[in-house]
Amino acid sequence: MAENVTSNNIIALKRVIIWGIPCAIFVLGVVLSEYEFKYKTPGFLIEIGDASYSCYLVHYFIVQRINTHFRVYISYAPDLSLIMIILIILFLSLFVYKYIEKRITDILRLKLQNSYNLSSVIANE
């Protein structure tokens, strides 16, 4: 399927029209509704957004493992399998974000702040 999309521009254009434009309009509507209607985004959606990079890093490995070990089960109930895979990716991404990515980011931020503070103190002397 992926080969057809990348090698055939008509199929790629159809995908953009059928999926890309409606998704872009949906995202734009959600973003603008926050400003227009003073809608406050729920905290769990913000947390999922914060974990998006972890999701990007983790999803490939999860999909590969599930595809390798549970291929037979996926063929019996593909829709249910897709929902389960998405939920597994979501929870593991949140776990990786909270316990790995966030901690590494905090450590690096502290080191950079300390480095910056020391260099500004030295420059002022």
Image: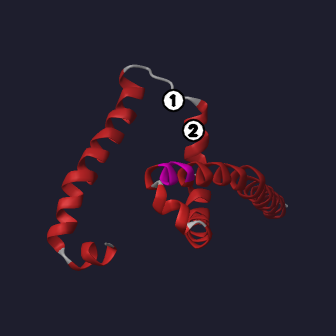
Q: Is residue 7 above or below residue 69?
A: below
Task: State whether the magenta stretch is mostly helix, strand or loop.
Answer: helix
Indicate the amino acid at tag 2.
Ile
Residue occupying image coordinates x 59% and y 65%? 70
Instruction: Specify the quadrant that holds the C terminus.
Output: bottom right
Q: Is residue 32 above or below residue 63?
A: above
The answer to whether 101 appears left or right of 81 in the picture is: right
Q: Position of residue 77 (x, y in %)?
A: 47, 54
User: Residue 102 magenta-drawn?
Assistant: no
Q: Is residue 102 above or below residue 39?
A: below
Residue occupying image coordinates x 32% and y 34%? 29
> Gap between marks 1 and 2, in whole Å?
7 Å
What's the magenta region? 80-84
Residue 67, by quadrant, is bottom right
Q: Position of residue 23 (x, y in %)?
A: 31, 46
Residue on which the image places disc 2: 46
Q: Position of residue 66 (x, y in %)?
A: 59, 65
Badge 2: few (under 14), some or many (20 or more) residues near its Cα, within 10 Å? few
Q: Are marks 1 and 2 in contact (CB under 8 Å)?
A: yes
The answer to whether 121 appears left or right of 28 in the picture is: right
Q: Position of residue 7 (x, y in %)?
A: 23, 80
Q: Is residue 27 above or below residue 12?
A: above
Q: Nearer the viewer, residue 88 or 123?
A: 88
Q: Secondary structure at mark 1?
A: loop
Indicate the amino acid at tag 1.
Thr
Residue on which the image places disc 1: 41
Which of the numbered marks, if any, corresponds to residue 24? none
Question: Which sits earlier in the primary sequence, circle 1 or circle 2?
Answer: 1
Q: How is the image coloured?
A: secondary structure
